[in-house]
Amino acid sequence: MLINEHYMNLSGNYLFAEIARKVKAFRELNPQTDVISLGIGDVTQPLAPAVVEALHHAADDMGSPASFRGYGPERGYEFLRQAIAFYDFAARGIDIKADEVFVSDGAKSDTGNFQELLSADSVVGVTDPVYPVYADANIMAGRSIVKLPCTADNNFVPELPREHLDVIYLCYPNNPTGTVLTRQQLSRWVAYALEHDALILYDAAYEAFISDTSIPHSIYEIAGARQCAIEFHSYSKTAGFTGLRCGYTVVPLDVTAATAAGRRIALNGLWNRRQSTKFNGTSYISQRAAQSIYTPQGRQQIQATINYYMHNAHQMLTTLRNLGHKTYGGENAPYIWMKTPGGLSSWQYFKLLLEEANVVCTPGIGFGPSGEGYVRFTAFNTRENTEKAMERIRAV
Amino acid sequence: MLINEHYMNLSGNYLFAEIARKVKAFRELNPQTDVISLGIGDVTQPLAPAVVEALHHAADDMGSPASFRGYGPERGYEFLRQAIAFYDFAARGIDIKADEVFVSDGAKSDTGNFQELLSADSVVGVTDPVYPVYADANIMAGRSIVKLPCTADNNFVPELPREHLDVIYLCYPNNPTGTVLTRQQLSRWVAYALEHDALILYDAAYEAFISDTSIPHSIYEIAGARQCAIEFHSYSKTAGFTGLRCGYTVVPLDVTAATAAGRRIALNGLWNRRQSTKFNGTSYISQRAAQSIYTPQGRQQIQATINYYMHNAHQMLTTLRNLGHKTYGGENAPYIWMKTPGGLSSWQYFKLLLEEANVVCTPGIGFGPSGEGYVRFTAFNTRENTEKAMERIRAV
């Protein structure tokens, strides 16, 4: 029996597993040391009271014969898809309907799995640096990857490719660089996709962190995107759902791809076929929890937590800049991308910070070759730990 | 941009979506009629009190800074994997360790996704009739499928294939036929797999319904299975988790497959790589709920619900046999497989039952060509509805 040989082309370890292992080894050697992680993008603040209340309510539903819920609707419960269509789109003047929304267990699964709908011969473009899932999922499927470098020279905004791409992953606000695309920059990508019959897989996981009103929250704010873009949303960072698991994917009815014979097939139906075959829906309880963040209290509470994290980001930016570090992001995103000092490599600086400051960052090289010489900091720790980490970095 | 052309080889609709559409159409034409579903295998009884209590407790954990949980460990929480390794395996004298267990959001996702680890050229065997996911997931990946007919002639026990298979899906107790494999029958499959370097993907989703003490609950009760079998478990039917989403997959450290160069690779590590790239874990709340079914109260409560469903199955068997129908299963499984009367096709009998008795069954043909002339009934409805459905069938 033979394995899927493409797996042998992956780098040995998933980046965050590799970091966790190194941190664990350090902790075992230094059991007294208090290590602060500004590395993996996990949140620290508890769920909002409105969400906890919804969880309790849903738990009670499941314990009573009259309100018990078994398998849910394939695309997610109507109560949640309607709330999404209204609050995340209609209320912002964006034309997305509830039957274009697929509730999922998180954006990672969907950004990883969506490529299955496309030909194995598709040429896939990803930014470099990039969230590893986009590239790894395509390497597993044997596809060739074109890297679109994002560097200080282009201000971390990728240039349009010279070659033909079939699929382009874009994530804005960006993980890992924390940078954003203006409406004009995003429009250029939509125009490219329409011209090249390419598909944009747009990861909007961090849109809730945008404060600059001129920055688009959704690719569907751009005319033409309904024909060429899929958009992924997550409640993980928006509402602290990293442990609860819920997100959604928008597949507009207008997005099609061709069969070999040239027939156009709607990806909405194809994704439904994929999900109804290889997925069995998101927990009812998590869907009720997600619904609760669209209530007035829920909205207010999750905004307070986002403000809390963005205040961390602001403090980090101030400290790092005062220390003379070159930074990007951190203004419309919970990530700060920083040039390593003294020409250190990403892993060298990771090691130095871990050993000297007992602070964990994410080595930029883990996100791709153009990430070499950078590290990523996240704003998701507590205020106290964030301040302590900045003091320690100041002292190094 | 081209689609994955293999999707065009799928039948138009996922079986249960097709049934749902037909039932919906009937209901719209007959709004006064009370339709009883013995079709889709969804449960009706609420979650056990111990599970509801665990859900509340976990919801509170998530609302407090000290006990909040973000991203969980990749393979699932230790508290659950240890309980699984102990109660489902060690306590039964089976050698499976916690680090061979991967907690998932349900067996459907894992039985659908596991094939990704294997070469696209693998020859895959599935029983016929079969739970559609196994075949569809492989058709989506472009693999050729060998059907192993299960008919009244072989008592719905597939014969060993004459050709070489790389992968074999077995589901026992079986969905849809409700039949089981004896230890001796299962041993033959393990011997075949070891001889042919084949992989058995063993779906044990219904093991909790086994009452006959001579029938194996796990393929790992058979010597040699640790070298050649992956086993899928679900809490969906065991504990009514269809809406809560939790299951697990066992990938023994001894199971390997070859690279093209002949190097053996452990599937445990490969599955970990797949899951840590394209999945982000099961809800903490669902994992706490799953843990609770291993407590003394939890075990007792879920057993009571299983007994309730199996009492339904017993009543259904009695009625259907008294009516002269030829039935299979229903003794160690929540499914009854019945020959349609009068030479009717599966869909003809489905239509007749829906229109004349207002009872929904699942047409056997939906599970494969050998299912033609059969229907599947499930024991998962309430006692009241099950009895009412039997009365109506008696009256047809």
Image: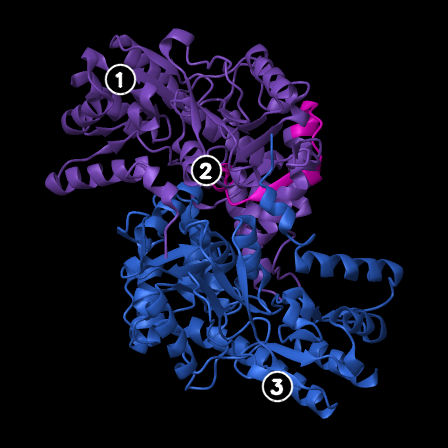
Chain colours: A blue, B purple
Pick the residue in front: A3 or B71.
Answer: A3
Instruction: Identify the magenta region.
Output: B89-111
Instruction: Say which element carries label 2.
Output: loop
Distance Cα–Cα, label 1 vs label 3: 68 Å
Q: Is residue A65 visible?
A: no
Quarter of the image with the N terminus of chain B is: bottom left
Expressed as whole percent of the image width and height from the top left, the position of residue B70 reads 61, 61
The image's mark for residue A303 is none
Image height of A219 relative to A341, above or below: above
Tell which of B65 and A243 is nearer to you.
A243
Q: Residue at x 16, y 18 (%)?
A: B395
Task: Please report whichever mark, 1 or 2, sits nearer to the chain's N-terminal start.
Answer: 2
Where disc 3 sits, the SS reads helix
| Residue A342 position by quadrant | bottom right
Frontmost of labels 2 and 3 is 3
Q: Residues within 10 Å of mark 2 (few under 14, many from 20)?
A: many
Q: Is residue A11 left or right of residue B157?
A: right
Amino acid marked by disc 2: Gly
Please tell me if label 2 and label 3 are on a single chain.
no
Mark 3 — residue? A314
Residue A289 x, y percent position in the rendering: 45, 60
| Circle 3 residues within 10 Å: few <14, some 14–19, many ≥20 | some
- Kindly report which numbered mark, 1 or 2, lies closer to the viewer in this rendering: 1
Q: Which residue is mark 2?
A: B240
Query: What type is the residue that disc 3 sits on?
Result: His
Q: Which secondary structure lies at badge 1?
A: loop
| Residue B367, quarter of picture | top left
Direction from residue B179 to residue A331 in the image, left or right: right
Same-chain check, marks 1 and 3: no
Identify the residue position indicated by label 1 in the image.
B373
Tell me which chain the residue with mark 3 is part of: A
Distance CA(mark 2)–CA(mark 3): 47 Å
